[in-house]
Amino acid sequence: MSAETVCKACGEEFDTRHNGCPVCGTGGTDVYRPFKPPFVYDVHGQLINDSEGDRVLDMRGWGRLTGRGSRAAGFSDELGAAIQDRIGRRVVELMNADAKRIEEEAEEA
Ligand SMILES: [Zn+2]
């Protein structure tokens, strides 16, 4: 038996037995949808892409890292980029571990 409902976020009709809206993921546990893991950190753009090259996140905080104001760290561009890279790689690790956990839980269900 199916139970249709309309997604409050995108308006798509879907079967409530799905893990949230199959179009935008609203109501489900797959928070990355429609982006596709595994995610990759791009050191040239300080950004995070999905497995198809679609941009998911940009690293920010350049002014905080390299600026000269009272709240700025005043790091060199090289050090600022290294810090962005370190954080970006960590975020990718966490996102990929989370996406893997979501996939495993979906397989067990
Ligand atoms: Zn939707």
Image (cartoon, rainbow, N blue to C red):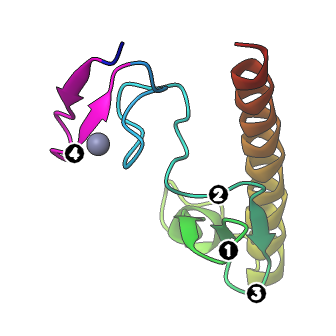
Give whichever of discs 3 and 2 has the lower sequence position: 2
Above or below residue 71? Residue 6 is above
User: Which residue is under mark 4?
Assistant: 12
Q: Label 3 is placed on what type of residue?
A: His
User: Which residue is under mark 2?
Assistant: 36
User: Which residue is under mark 3?
Assistant: 44
Residue 50, x across and y down, in percent:
67, 65
Q: Which quadrant of the render holds ligand 1?
A: top left
Ligand 1 within 8 Å of disc 4? The answer is yes
Ligand 1 within 8 Å of disc 1? The answer is no
- Residue range of the region highlighted in magenta in the rendering: 3-16
Q: Quote the CA–CA distance across marks 3 and 2.
A: 21 Å
- Looking at the image, residue 106 sits to the left or right of residue 20; the answer is right
Please name which of the two marks, 3 or 2, marks the residue nearer to the observer: 2
Residue 5, x across and y down, in percent:
20, 25
- Looking at the image, residue 52 sits to the left or right of residue 15; the answer is right
Q: Quote the CA–CA distance across marks 1 and 3.
A: 17 Å
Q: Is residue 7 magenta?
A: yes
SS class, disc 4: loop
The numbered disc on residue 52 is: 1
Q: Is residue 60 magenta?
A: no
Give whichever of discs 1 and 3 has the lower sequence position: 3
Q: Label 1 is placed on what type of residue?
A: Glu
SS class, disc 1: loop
Q: Are marks 4 and 3 in contact (CB under 8 Å)?
A: no
